[in-house]
Amino acid sequence: MQNNEKHPGLLMNGCKLPDHCPPIIIITVLLLLFPFLSVNSQIMDKNNIIAEGAELDLLGEGFKFTEGPAPDAHGNVYFTDQPNNTIVKWNWTTGEFSVFMEEAGRSNGMYFDIDGNLITCADMDNELWSVDMETKEVAILVDNWNSKLLNGPNDVWVRPDGGMYFTDPLYKRGYWERDPEMQQDGEHVYFLSADRSRFFRVDEDLVKPNGIIGTPDGKTLYVADIGDKKTYVYDINEDGTLSNRRLFCDLGSDGMTMDDRGNVYLTGRGVTVFDKSGERIAHIPVDKGWTANICFAGPDRDMLFITAMDAVFGIKMNVRGVN
């Protein structure tokens, strides 16, 4: 059972932050993996996917490092403050923040499964979790590959039948008590079947896979290779394997999402949007050193919710999210 105590101070300008947690990502290194995009530039929107007159709104700040946003069925967003080892809830109706879970396994990327459980990449012990939203009870879905620890599950997507794909790059964490060196023979992408009976690698030929997202029909998967500054697209086979890998665009990404036009949203230096053909159609600058992750929020999924460093932002859209 996890503690569900509310933190009344965790509002617009601030959660109570423990001062013993070290930073978890070396932002300078990640920035070198991306082409330069000025954070002071204007919004670029070739296809009118952003609502007319919409601006990027600061929803909250005072966190340590925000990641892994996932919307529930009502449009509220759960995201992680990884250095503080918490999962935070943003209430769509009130705009308030509260701590949903402490001792959250240093969770990173998250996604709701078809039963309403919160799937989290629990990086502290290199596990993939399923969290019951009512009881906060944790089920460990994956904790090793071939009897060796994973490198550190980073981002996850659940396909319509409940099977899930996740990335496993290596980002050495200061809080690890295990050997910080790579435990696997590389940084790969994995699949876990819906009945949990099959667990296997689906791509072993990437430098550093990170962001991952799939289409709502469960037929297409996008994986960002942030280490090679590329994003790939695959056909998804019924048995969980992938085929027909091809280059989608020459840009990697931390987090990813998708809208109902098939546009794919990548993060890093702000948010960059590509249409389904791989053409760059929009860019939303975010005045932070790193934009980590994104999702669509609200009951109509028409607000783009953005996590960036110590803050979270929102912007009204003309399109709707599909995940």
Image: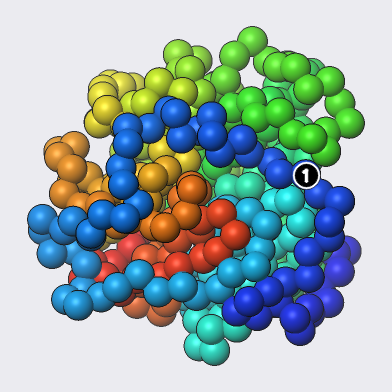
Q: Quadrant of residue 99?
A: bottom right
In this picture, residue 254 sits left or right of residue 44: right
Residue 121 locus on image (x, y percent): 65, 44
In this picture, residue 197 sits left or right of residue 50: right
Residue at image x 65%, y 80%? 11
Residue 66 locus on image (x, y percent): 60, 56
- The residue lying furthest to the front in this view is 40
Residue at image x 44%, y 29%? 32
Q: Amino acid at mark 1?
A: Pro
Local crowd at mark 1 within 10 Å, few (<14), some, or many (≥20)? few
Query: With respect to residue 122, does 36 lie above or below?
Result: above
In this picture, residue 133 sits left or right of residue 73: right
Task: Give the labeled residue for mark 1.
Answer: 22
Query: With respect to residue 306, does 125 lie above or below?
Result: above
Q: Quadrant of residue 297?
A: bottom left
Q: Quadrant of residue 185?
A: top right
Residue 49 locus on image (x, y percent): 19, 63
Residue 89 locus on image (x, y percent): 63, 72
Of 220 and 321, nearer the camera is 321
Query: With respect to residue 79, does 75 lie above or below?
Result: below
In this picture, residue 133 sits left or right of residue 318: right
Q: Secondary structure at mark 1?
A: loop
Considering the image in quadrants, where does the C terminus appear?
A: bottom left
Of 301 and 23, nearer the camera is 23
Considering the image in quadrants, where does the N terminus appear?
A: bottom right
Residue at image x 56%, y 38%? 27
Of 283 and 49, nearer the camera is 283
* Residue 81 appears in the figure: yes
Residue at image x 26%, y 70%? 317
